[in-house]
Image: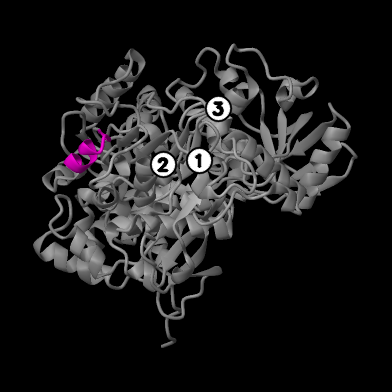
């Protein structure tokens, strides 16, 4: 997994609440393997492109300089709905490495951590102000520093965010989670023996 | 000795599955059941490339539901999908995983067949690479959806690193009125707490209206927990649960059944257990409910009218409503019962069980569908049971298309989608933009309400059809 340490990049504001993962990547693309040809174009496909493949000029990521955005600043419950981690893969294919939101869909939130994208939760008023600054100063950059747990806004204000220490460490190192867990093999085996004795009916 | 602190059902199940405690309070949680489908082929591929094996194939079960067509023979729609299904068949055989594949009457939607086969049991942890996995929580299981990266992790380790969610109890007391069912209850709940209301929570549904429900109905309620933002939804097991499970193929038998039953009876939340949040609804106030917008929280009683964004004080909410109404092609103030539909879909992991098909057939009997209408049973066994009762004949005589099991037009991954601009009365779970096809407009409702829409051609209060 690609590690995440610190990032200073153009950020794009997405003002709609409850942006679901079907909108982030429509279901018909889910069969494609990660990194398949054209994967980047799957992101927000149906709100980003017309039927003939041309761009819809009103969509934020089709406008310069938001086109270069590596950070999205969204409204509440971004990434709700389906469990597809292809939503994260499609963001990643477009260079997006961090999503800042007042809240995120639970499964999407987990999927970000497991695919090298940093989800940042900040209070609704702070996030709304970030989006306002990005609209007023298109192309303004935000700095996300995972080690320091801060988001530095275009106006220079630094906002501290909370993150689970385990998830933070995994992102900073980019460590393979399965390899980590396989290191717990003896604990898993001991659990299985105890669990089988306590609940023998669970073995189908 | 000090009295034990009362615990919630969630807490009891969680505590029993902790393998190890990691940094920051994350725990390594053991998974008792892992359900797989064609979408899991991504994870199988990565596992294989990493040279790893499925740790507990005996706790893993697979089926083909998302991508197969629901036309006779359940074929693959194209070579790419054919490849996915062949890959699933190959991987499950190579890893010695039970597979309910095409041609097996037990094949069906993963969340229908888990309970049907008795794989879903009280007290278990169960995951699947699908957000509607909370369905299984209806049995008093801790069940939640995961992404394909986590699917691969469970394959390799039979565990997941999880942070404990908070627990919300939603109590629905009282009696549901005529024509009102489980779907109306969950839509009313989502409308009340919002599409993000359950974020970070596991929900326990409680109260006399929930207790009075059959297992089929309880599954409908738990199924849509994710539409309220919650990864897991659960209902305490009781006599209804045990009666459903006893004798199912993979359910415990004999002494083990007795042993399991004794254990399960201690699972419900203790009196005095404290929940992080409590919500209450009066069952008697819930009407047949439909959605008008593009989020499941956009739900109203069928007696209502399309809402007016101009009356919404919050700017973000107003803009969101305006966008939803533009997409849905609706005018504020229109009575919901004047909205004409182009198509009806009865199916999905929310509403394709036998009780759902019976409820729809009761409305359809002796009438004709005036728009194209599909019935997609949740499994081969649901289909067979419905045919045994003659429900298929009722639907077919009314002009409905009676199809094979699968996810079908709920998600449209197999190409079974509505056309651009078509308005669908659907028993599925998501009315998102483009969910049932690019530009398709979805109204969510119960099977009885969808059947009513099919025979009138518009959204209809099922109570006015007199059955």
* Magenta-drawn stretch contains B397: yes
* Residue B143 appears in the figure: no
Query: Which residue is found at the position 33% from the left and 58% from the top?
Result: B466
Q: Chain of mark 3?
A: A
Instruction: Please tell me which residue is depicted at 44% across the width and 44% down the height of the picture.
Output: B429
Quarter-of-image position of residue B102 = top left
Is B127 located above or below residue A25 in the figure?
below
- In depth, the one of A21 and B466 nearer the eye is B466
Q: Is B252 displayed left or right of A95 in the figure?
A: left
Query: Alpha carbon of mark 2 to alpha carbon of mark 3: how far?
Result: 30 Å
- Give the Cα distance between marks 2 and 1: 9 Å
Q: Quadrant of the C terminus of chain B?
A: bottom left
Q: How many marks?
A: 3
Instruction: From the image, state whether disc 2 or disc 3 is nearer to you.
Output: 2
Q: Residue A13 in the image: state x and y as whole percent.
A: 75, 35
Q: Which residue is mark 2?
A: B426
Mark 1 surroundings within 10 Å by alpha-carbon count, few (fewer than 14), some (14 through 19), many (20 or more): many
Q: Secondary structure at mark 1?
A: loop
Per the rendered image, the range of residues in magenta is: B392-402
Q: Which residue is mark 3?
A: A89
Residue behind mark 1: B431
Q: Residue furthest right?
A: A155
Say which element carries label 2.
strand
What subunit carries mark 1?
A: B
Vertical position of residue A115 compared to residue A121: above or below: above
Quick one: A81 or B418, which is closer to the camera?
B418
Mark 2 surroundings within 10 Å by alpha-carbon count, few (fewer than 14), some (14 through 19), many (20 or more): many
Label 3's element?
helix
| Residue at 40% in and 44% down | B453
Name, please, the residue furthest toward the left. B254
Foreground: disc 2 or disc 1: 2
Indicate left or right for B255 with B200 as reference.
left
């Amino acid at each position: 997994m690609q590690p995440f340490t610190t990032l200073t990049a153009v950020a794009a504001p997405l003002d709609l609440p409850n942006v679901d993962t079907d909108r982030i990547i429509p279901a018909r693309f889910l069969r494609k393997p990660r990194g398949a040809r054209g994967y980047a174009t799957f992101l927000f496909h149906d709100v980003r492109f017309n039927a003939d493949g041309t761009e819809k000029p009103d969509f934020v990521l089709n406008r310069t300089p938001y086109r270069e955005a590596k950070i999205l600043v969204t409204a509440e419950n971004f990434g709700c709905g389906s469990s597809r981690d292809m939503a994260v893969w499609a963001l990643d294919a477009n260079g997006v490495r961090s999503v800042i939101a007042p809240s995120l869909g639970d499964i999407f939130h987990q999927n970000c951590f497991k695919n090298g994208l940093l989800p940042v939760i900040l209070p609704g008023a702070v996030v709304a102000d970030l989006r306002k600054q990005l609209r007023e100063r298109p192309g303004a950059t935000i700095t996300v520093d995972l080690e320091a747990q801060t988001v530095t806004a275009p106006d220079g204000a630094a906002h501290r965010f909370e993150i689970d220490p385990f998830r933070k460490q995994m992102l900073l190192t980019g460590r393979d989670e399965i390899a980590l867990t396989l290191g717990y093999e003896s604990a898993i085996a001991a659990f299985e023996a105890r669990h089988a004795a306590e609940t023998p009916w669970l073995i189908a | 000795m000090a009295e034990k602190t009362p615990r919630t059902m969630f807490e009891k199940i969680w505590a029993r599955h902790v393998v190890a405690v990691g940094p920051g309070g994350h725990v390594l949680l053991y998974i008792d059941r892992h359900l797989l489908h064609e979408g899991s082929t991504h994870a199988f591929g990565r596992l294989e490339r990493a040279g790893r094996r499925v740790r507990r194939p005996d706790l893993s079960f697979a089926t083909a539901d998302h991508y197969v067509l629901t036309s006779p023979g359940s074929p693959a729609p194209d070579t790419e999908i054919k490849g996915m299904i062949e890959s699933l068949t190959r991987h499950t055989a190579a890893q010695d995983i039970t597979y309910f594949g095409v041609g097996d009457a037990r094949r069906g939607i993963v969340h229908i067949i888990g309970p049907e086969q008795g794989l879903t049991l009280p007290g278990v942890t169960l995951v699947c690479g699908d957000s509607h996995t909370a369905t299984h929580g209806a049995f008093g299981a801790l069940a939640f959806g995961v992404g394909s990266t986590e699917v691969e992790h469970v394959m390799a380790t039979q565990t997941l690193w999880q942070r404990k969610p908070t627990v919300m109890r939603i109590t629905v007391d009282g009696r549901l009125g005529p024509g009102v069912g489980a779907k109306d209850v969950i839509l009313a709940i989502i409308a009340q707490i919002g599409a993000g209301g359950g974020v970070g929570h596991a929900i326990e549904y409680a109260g006399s209206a929930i207790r009075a429900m059959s297992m089929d109905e309880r599954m409908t309620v738990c199924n849509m927990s994710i539409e309220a933002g919650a990864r897991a939804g659960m209902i305490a097991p009781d006599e209804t649960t045990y009666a459903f499970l006893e004798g199912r193929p993979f359910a415990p038998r004999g002494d083990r059944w007795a042993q399991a039953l004794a254990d399960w009876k201690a699972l419900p939340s203790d009196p005095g257990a404290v929940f992080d949040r409590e919500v209450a609804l009066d069952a008697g106030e819930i009407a047949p409910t439909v959605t008008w917008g593009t989020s499941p929280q956009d739900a109203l009683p069928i007696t209502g009218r399309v809402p007016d964004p101009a009356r919404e004080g919050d700017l973000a909410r107003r803009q969101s409503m305006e966008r939803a109404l533009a997409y849905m092609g609706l005018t504020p103030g229109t009575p919901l019962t004047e909205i004409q539909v182009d198509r009806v879909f009865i199916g999905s992991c929310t509403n394709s069980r036998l009780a759902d098909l019976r409820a729809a057939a009761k409305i359809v009997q002796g009438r004709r569908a005036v728009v194209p209408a599909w019935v997609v049973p949740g499994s081969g066994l649901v289909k067979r049971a419905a045919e045994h009762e003659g429900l298929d004949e009722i639907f077919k005589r009314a002009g409905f298309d009676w199809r094979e099991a699968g996810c079908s037009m709920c998600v449209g991954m197999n190409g079974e989608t509505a056309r651009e601009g078509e308005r669908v009365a659907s028993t599925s779970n998501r009315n998102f933009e483009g969910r049932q096809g690019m530009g398709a407009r979805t109204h969510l409702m119960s099977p009885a309400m969808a059947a009513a829409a099919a025979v009138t051609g518009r959204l209809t209060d099922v109570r006015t059809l007199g059955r």
